[in-house]
Image (cartoon, helix red, strand yellow):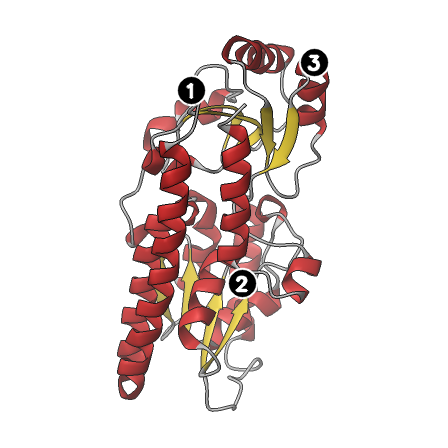
Amino acid sequence: MKKPVLFLCFFMLLSISFSGCAGSPQDDGKLHIVSTIFAPYDFARNICGDDCYVSMLLTPGVDIHAYEPTPQDILTIQNCDLFIYVGGESDAWVEQILSSLEGVRTLRLIDCVTVLQEEHIEGMEVAQEEHKDAAAEPDEHVWTSPYNAIQITRAIGDVLCDLLPEQADKILSSVDTYTQQLQALDTQIANIVANAEQNTLIFADRFPMRYFTEYYGLRYFAAFPGCASNTEPSAAVVTFLIDKIKEEGINVVLYTEFSNQKMADTICEATGAQKLCMHSCHNVSQEDFDHNVSYLDLMYANAQVLEQALNP
């Protein structure tokens, strides 16, 4: 998720050259909200309904680790009324672009919650440079916990009330309705964990679910940290995960959306475990986007996967 400095400078120059000569705000009378990724995009559209125009920078089906902003993306940010982004090191390009723009109201997800540090745990493949910086690097996948999703939703609602004071009562009502749905999701997941036979998850992939496992008191082992640049595991990592599955009698190996699943296949072949997807909700496929799949849909599917993974 880290972007080269050269292309950041290039897009900074583009943003300056385009400002004032293209991309004028859409004259539809609606507040325009732009989110970098799917989860806060979905939170915002649940709060706004048809009263705001909500869009997502990340193209459906694209992994955030492969995303690079385009000049049009910069114009979209420049011309919106509210820009929602994650923050942290992976969004350094955002901070660079925002420093050249004026009048863009922003909300950083990492400012809405208690931030945890990215963990490098036993058995995990960690590049030398990533390990050196680990103590200072926050885990940016804050939306993966339903509890955090509630805090983010409320923060979005507060900003919208400020931007649309005449609609504050309606916005707050929508926030209350949606957070109740998130609380129901939280309750279901908590019940699954409370009644589970095990409490350990195995990820044959990057691990974006730190906030989820921390909140529900789950153990995990994973091949890579959440924002790892390297996703080619060593034999030692694969062997470690295989041995851990056998030692603890685990029957499910997890991978995340847009994974090539090769490591999960290797580990499942060696252990007889089943592979299942746990969705981080950072983006959705084009098909899911076209069918209006929501954060709640994905997280309830995760709850079903969790139940299988914790009950061999």
In this picture, residue 113 sits left or right of residue 10: left
Give the amino acid type for the residue marked by disc 2 in the picture: Leu
Please tell me whether mark 2 sits on a helix, a strand or a loop.
helix
Cα gap from disc 1 to disc 2, whole angstroms: 40 Å
In this picture, residue 151 sits left or right of residue 205: left
Mark 3 or mark 1, earlier in chain: 1
In this picture, residue 194 sits left or right of residue 76: left
Location of the C terminus by quadrant is top right
> How far across and down, in percent of the image, does residue 95 sit?
41, 56
Q: Which residue is mark 1?
A: 121
> How far across and down, in percent of the image, does residue 161 sit?
28, 77
The residue located at (53%, 29%) in the rendering is 309
Mark 1 or mark 2, earlier in chain: 2
Q: Which residue is mark 3?
A: 270
> How far across and down, in percent of the image, does residue 116 sit?
32, 37
> How far across and down, in percent of the image, does residue 89 sit?
42, 43
Q: Image quarter for residue 155?
A: bottom left
Residue 281 can be seen in this image? no
